[in-house]
Image (cartoon, rainbow, N blue to C red):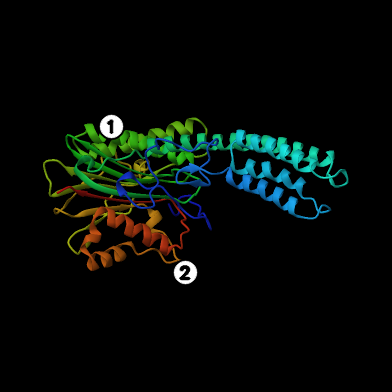
Amino acid sequence: MSGRGRTPVGGRPPRLLPHRSTARPTARPTARPTARPTARHPQILRVRGRRAAWVPPLLLLVAIVVIDYHTAREFRIISWLVLVPGIAAAICGVWTTAAFAVLSTLTYLVADSVLPNEYQAGPADFALSAIGGTLATLACAVRVQAERRALHLEDVAETIRRTVLRPLPPGWGGLDHAAVYLTADVEAAVGGDFYDIQPGPHGTRVLVGDVQGKGLSAVEAAAALLGTFREAGYHEADLATVAERLESRMVRHVAHVTALGREDADRFATAVLLNFPAHRPGTLESVVFGHEPPLVIGAGEVRQLPPGDALPLGLAALTGTTAPPPVRRTPLAAGETVLLTTDGVTEARDGIGAFYPLAAEVTRAVAADPRAGEPRGLVNLVRDGTLHHCGGVLADDTTVFAVRRRS
């Protein structure tokens, strides 16, 4: 969020965390795989699904023996067998590395003993081979431990991401939807952007927003808002009441963080809250909390929803009134798609500092091909356009979310 404490991450490629409903070819699965790679069974050097990491060190061992046998007796390279367990330590498991350490030492003994005494390498090189194999096995054990720890941390990050950005089933709440989530920090699984759909007896509610700042504290605030949205969005009949609940939750979250004495207490969030009423299919209700208004894409045309008068979540007290924010009602024809983005899209800059022209690009694409207005086509279009415009270097977390009533 520009102007609110965001720091560009220069020179680092964005990390793509797509939603299950997008079904893109580069998608990273949101569901946990049934069989994950482990440090003991690395995924490198696999042939037709079978592990082949043992092949390179074995080929090296055979090559060293063959070359040593076919060269002059004064030229000995049998001591190079110490490289075999070293290669195995980098790509194989602990037991495989230990096996190569023993095999290379035994091979050294056999190959060295067949030569006359004056050409034998002697016990010094034998000790080098044995010590090298032992050290390689220990190094492999350290590598395996680090890989297991990395996998555990990845699982923790994935759990956090799925808690904040829960997977949305196809057609959830009677809406066709698609999403793209890009984090500016390549090491982060989730940032301050958030989105969700909550169906209920009073309609289907949609929330897209962006917490000021970045880091785990922004994720914490996003999780608090989403928790409130999922409850209030289901139970409350009036969208204005849902908006009030979100404002109250943000204020209480800031008060809690302030009481803890943390330095990140001055949080707020921009957001768009939508409602697709169950009893008025031709109407869209919206509350915009200081966020970029959504675009509505229809039959060859693109229009912007009213911007609204609400301040970002957590700042309503600045208005000096306790009245709920106004709810805007807009006609929504069948087949029209609502496109919501965070400022990672609208504030993406090119090499000369120009912002990404979102509305113009979408209008041009829809005019050329009406099918571009479908949710999946829209999010792919905006994702590719944003990354191309900024040269693949995002200065902010970026969310593209498109929803449309199912026919």
Q: Residue 163 carries which label?
A: none
Outermost residue toward the right? 118
At which x and y percent is residue 321? 30, 41
From this view, report whether residue 125 is shown above or below residue 390. Answer: above
* In this picture, residue 228 sits left or right of residue 254: left
Residue 107 picture location, percent across and down: 72, 40
User: How packed is label 2: few (under 14 Cα within 10 Å), some, or many (20 or more)?
Assistant: few
Residue at the image point whose x is 11% and y is 41% from the top? 279
Cβ atoms under marks 2 and 1 closer than 8 Å: no
Q: Is residue 117 above or below residue 357?
A: above
Q: Is residue 216 above or below residue 390?
A: above
Image location of residue 137, percent across then percent down: 67, 35
Mark 1 falls on what kind of element?
helix
Work out whether residue 33 or residue 350 is closer to the camera in this orientation and state it: 33
Whether residue 23 is visible to the viewer of this picture, yes or no, is yes
The location of residue 19, given as percent across then percent down, is: 34, 45
Q: What element does badge 2 sit on?
A: loop
| Number of residues whose C-alpha sits closer than 10 Å to that of mark 1, classed few (under 14), some (14–19) or many (20 or more) | some
The three-letter code of the residue at mark 2 reads Ile
Nearest the eye: 4 or 171: 171
| Mark found first going from the N terminus, 2 or 1 | 1
Residue at horizontal 26 percent and vertical 53 percent from the top:
375
Identify the residue at horizontal 67%, vertical 46% (top origin). Answer: 61
Among the 4 quarters of the image, the one containing residue 86 = top right
Q: Which amino acid does label 1 sit on?
A: Glu
Q: Give left or right: position of 287 versus 211.
A: left
- Pick whichever, 128 or 110, lies toward us: 110
* CA–CA distance in space, label 2 to label 1: 45 Å
Q: Name the residue under label 2.
A: 352
- Residue 231's disc number: 1
